Amino acid sequence: VTSTVVSPLELLRTRMQATRAANAGGLLPMATALVRDEGVRSLWRGLVPTLWRDVPFSCMYWLSYEAIKRRVVESSPNKELPTSAAFAAGATSGTIAAFATTPLDVVKTRQQLQQQSPAAHAATTSATTSAATASSTASAATNMPRASAQGSPTATAMGMGAELLAIARAEGVGALFVGLGPRLAKVAPSCAIMIASYELGKRYLGELRVTNLAAAVQGTTKPTCLVSYIASCDHHR
């Protein structure tokens, strides 16, 4: 659901990173021009490969993280997961998932850089050519085909497997992993920070709950709504 909702923003981000001309008017004018030239449905171009990328990514990430977490907790003397270990486990899991789904990210980027309108196609092709030497385009441009900045003309009509196979046959297997470095540099730290923050927050709230429960039992403080609710749940078990 989240990937579907933010897909238009992902498409606009990709195009703005790939073409210098797209940054001139800003996000809203670019979206308006895209809808006018290519239709509302064009905002969701690349949604299918985005879902193919994000769903397996989440599955692999959480499976890897939980496996690493379980091993760390079992080997820990106090049976807890240190924040540093959570950070490392998040980075490792994110790296594994990002590496495995990079070919799907390549297909997604190529489809999002396609144009339907001939006028828009010519404008973006010209802008992409002039921006190819700019260092600021490295993030999204690294996933673009070597032969054409717009991807194969029939990419959106092809199935995911057929698209991957066509890229591998035409440009080699290495083309499926173009942009892997920048992707790992982005995903690994973001996953590490996210999961470390989650574990730290969960530990803090857990300790706060225990403290409040103990204080409520001793009658030294008035129990909060959360503590009262938890106590009632325990009473009715």
Image (cartoon, rainbow, N blue to C red):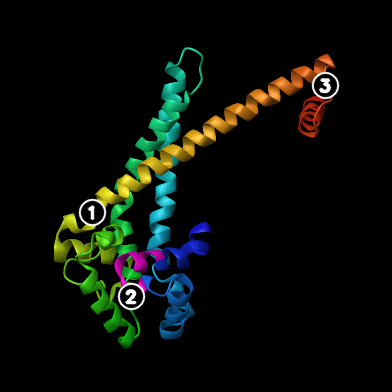
Q: Mark 3 belongs to which amino acid?
A: Thr
Based on the displayed image, in which of its 4 quarters is residue 59 positioned? top left
Q: Is residue 149 visible?
A: no
Magenta residues (range): 13-22
Considering every residue shown, the one lying at the far top of the view is 77
State the mark number for residue 221: 3
Reading the image, the residue beneath label 1 is: 177
Asked if the stretch drawn in magenta spans residue 21, the answer is yes
The answer to whether residue 118 is above or below residue 85 is below
| In-image side of 229 versus 96 (left or right) | right
Question: Residue 67: x, y in percent?
Answer: 42, 31
At a point 31% along the width and 45% down the height, the residue shown is: 185
Asked if the stretch drawn in magenta spans residue 232, the answer is no
The answer to whether residue 171 is above or below residue 181 is below
Q: CA distance from mark 2 to mark 3?
A: 65 Å
Considering every residue shown, the one lying at the far bottom of the view is 119
